[in-house]
Amino acid sequence: MRLEVVDHGRPGSGPGSLRLAARTLGFAVDQGVPAVLSNAVRYADPGQGPVADVLDSARRLVPVDRRRPETWDGGERWLKDAAAMGRAAERIAEAAGFRRGRAHRLLALTEETAGECRVDPRSDIGLGRIHFPEPALVGAAHRTAARVLRSRCAAAMVLRGYDRDRARWARLHDELGTIERLGYPSYFLTVAQVVDDVRSLGIRVAARGSGAGSLVNHLLGIAHADPVEHGLLMERFLSGRRAALPDIDIDVESARRLEVYHAIFDRFGAERVATVAMPETYRVRHAVRDVGAALGLDPARVDGLAKAFPHIRARDARAALAELPELRGVREGADERLWQLVEALDALPRGMAMHPCGVLLSDATLLDRTPVVPTSGEGFAMSQFDKDDVEDLGLLKLDVLGVRMQSAMAHAVAEIGRATGVRLDLDDPEQVPPGDPATYDLIRSTETLGCFQIESPGQRDLVGRLQPATFHDLVVDISLFRPGPVAADMVRPFIDARHGRAPVRYPHADLAEPLRETYGVVVFHEQIIEILRIMTGCGRDEADERRRALADAEQQARVRDWFARRAAGRGYAPDVVAHTWEIVEAFGAYGFCKAHAVAFAVPTYQSAWLKAHHPAAFYAGLLTHDPGMYPKRLLLADARRRGVPVLPLDVNRSAITHRIELVSGREGAPDAWGLRLALSDVHGMSGVEAGRIADGQPYRSLADLWQRARPSRPVAERLARVGALDAFGANRRDLLLHLAELHRHGRGAPGGQLTLHLDGQPGLPPRPGGAGDGAGVESAEPVEPAGLPDLSDVERLSAELGVLGMDASRHLMADHRDFLAELGAVPARLLRDARHGDTVLVAGAKAATQTPPIRSGRRVIFTTLDDSTGLVDCAFFDDSHEACARTVFHSWLLLVRGTVQRRGPRSLSVVGSAAWNLAELAELRRTGGLEAVTARLAAAPEPDRAPQDGAPSDGPAAEPGPSGAGAGRTIRLETGYALHPWADLQPPGERAATGRKLWHASPGSAG
């Protein structure tokens, strides 16, 4: 035991006071207990006391008390040097009545205690060594793991029909040799066991990443695609020259990810498995909210300030206020103290959560090497190391990624089976043929909303230009649409060569084979590996090592010298060597791994196949699991455009999830599968309530629903407003009145219990039958009309958007159709006929905003509008941001003036020069007439200005600042390309969907 002595110079005799420190030291001496000197360090540098106060305020959920300064952090808890701590020891010893020697003794005891606490990570707890689960747990109880792995791979060669292919046998032998030399057979058997267990649960599972390039992974059933068929290289994944652990990531259904975790814990035991921690750190929005709360500012004002920002680092708050046009005026909404504290919180931890995919697997000594805490909810053991720590410490981490698209496809397949009896297997090439014409027709049409990896505006543009016709084309498309290839300008040369607008050229005839599949353009990391191998004569393992070194500017020069020397030694001319090196240098570190793309292309094709052949089931899966970047209302509009009947919410027909129903054709048209909306989409309805409603179907009357399903009054009223109770007759306002009456009688019952709704009870409709009497939906007892006017069309639409987050009965732009026709706005359907360079007006509900990085370093705001006839992709360059940026980010319905830009037969966008809030224009049309609207459109656009409270403002605009966001500031990359400081830092669609969003906003988007 040790007694801690701390002096923070606080007055009185409480914690941190000199008096308490002296008394503690004296007590330790009297009792013969060693004392240690500490500063109770909380922050590294002086001056951070106010930041600690904000963190304390956020933890306690109370503002900093300005009237009690004694509760503030004193500002002394920083990491002081030895001299400062020596002075503190002398001060405490003197106050305790001891001589200076006691201060020296206190320091010596502190140093001695610190030495006793020192741990050698490698020798004391075994960190740095790899610990796989015991072989007996993965089927190697009586044979070595290496022999079991070889046996399983050989059997799979026969089962897959590869046993007569000598090239595959040779590759398998090489891969197994590498795995055995590195000591990894147990690792591959462990991952294979996890995948087998997941499949046995009926959960969709697939490998992603460079692990898809291993034939062993394919034979074990870990990876779906055949790496030999697709030209994938094992060396990109694993080789004898790579010191890092192999990294096999597996995708599972997101809705069943926790089932997978339970299966892993059950298989290997709690002493061998732990999830990985994920620190949640401060970014600007959370920082603004917590600092505002700590300072006692008005919550609504703080919320407005926070929402004004894009999702950026907290440390960049004041830079963004100065440079982003959409934030002009926000800085004046708070004093400078707030912004200083916001930036001081940057990257500090807010809490610790379970990582969404990392799982540690080890032998039975895992808990000796990592501290764990139980997670909230499921109670999984969670390592207190984050994902970077565990890799540095040599702990085996398996990434089990919950992918919403896998859940969406599984739901679609289940619905097909439920409704038709057909057992569909998406992984069976007999059922889902690889070259299906209808699937590729759909992809080439760019109508790919909801399809994995190819639904974003940029991808739809690329698909329209590339026109994929084969699986390999999808692989190339996915590889090209990455920040590196886009920044390195790989896209344009590939498209031109593919369509014959530019000749196919190779740096040398020897390189024709690896570059033929991409028309001479380097796209994949695997191609760089092959170029280096061919021209230098090295092995693929060394070539990959050199490729990875290209990302380091210091190593790049050494790689260049090595390449030039080895290539010249093999007889290549100096000009060929120089030209090839330019290609390698430009693309080597910024291309894309082909194995990644092949793994992604499999669900891309499967999702497109479902959309082409089973659209209703496809949309049911999308709406249930919300896998993509777009809001549900846009997917519903896409379903309507593709002829899928949208069936309304109905308490007698709707399930918890979205389902498909057969709809009778009208006027001789064939029957079609329709999409029935789900109870789970009702705002505020719990899973328990939705389950009770679904389990009790059908209901014969409103009173029957009220009594047996027991919905809360707010939920029941929401159901009435969106038409889910229309089967009970009367109009929706009458239904709301009857619900109020039911609620009044229920609350008046003794003991808070619901009364039995007996026939003839005053104010309640009679109930003709009891629960479970087998009565069908058609026999529902109608509610007696009360004579109230029904909800108007506008009220119904508003209710749908508020309750469901979707315009379910009709498109919200329908109300503006006549107004837009007066203005001459071009519908998306007719925009396809516009010529390049035409000036047009377009309008719609905003579906997405993004600010992706582009190679010029300019900031471009991309937004997608939905006008019920289709989608319009708009781009606003930085010269328009002063006038447009805030309107684009903070308005939902937009009218945009711009110029048509065409880059291919299916590639069309509008370069915006002005934008208006369509709702404001519609109100102006109502109050001032069409002339007032045209005058507004004709006026020179004024700079957007954010109001001080963060809400839309009708006040005068601020004086324009420097032209363009960032005033020309760019980040220069080692490749020579530029990056705008406020561009998105991650691709769209990778964050978890919110489930109730009305449009997608990328991290670089405000609002």
Image (cartoon, helix red, strand yellow):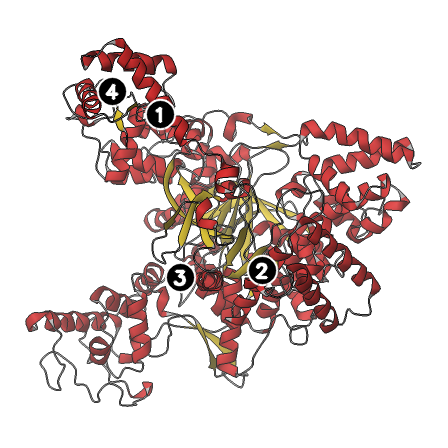
Discs 3/4, front: 4
Decide if residue 521 is in sight here: no
Residue 306 location in percent, x, y? 35, 38
Q: Name the residue under label 1.
A: 340
The reply, left or right, for residue 465 in relation to residue 771 is right
Residues under labels 1 and 4: Cα distance?
28 Å
Neighbourhood count class around disc 1 (C-alpha, 10 Å): few under 14, some 14–19, many 20 upward: some
The reply, left or right, for residue 682 in relation to residue 769 is right
Indicate the quadrant containing the C terminus: top left, top right, bottom left or bottom right: top left
Discs 4/2, front: 2
Which of these two is toward me, 790 or 89?
Answer: 89
Disc on the earlier residue, 4 or 2: 4
User: Does the CB distance between marks 1 and 4 fall below 8 Å?
Assistant: no
Residues under labels 3 and 1: Cα distance?
40 Å
Residues under labels 2 and 1: Cα distance?
55 Å
Disc on the earlier residue, 3 or 4: 4
Identify the residue at horizontal 47%, vertical 74% (top origin). 645
Q: Mark 4 points at which residue?
A: 7
Q: Label 2: state its secondary structure.
A: helix
User: Does the CB distance between marks 3 and 1 fall below 8 Å?
Assistant: no
Identify the residue at horizontal 72%, vertical 40% (top origin). 545
Dividing the picture into quadrants, the one containing residue 37 is top left
Q: In this view, does 978 lie above or below 533?
A: above
Disc on the earlier residue, 1 or 4: 4
The reply, left or right, for residue 904 in relation to residue 1 is right
Q: Mark 2 points at which residue?
A: 135
Type of residue at label 1?
Gln
The reply, left or right, for residue 823 in relation to residue 564 is left
Identify the residue at horizontal 91%, vertical 34% (top origin). 569
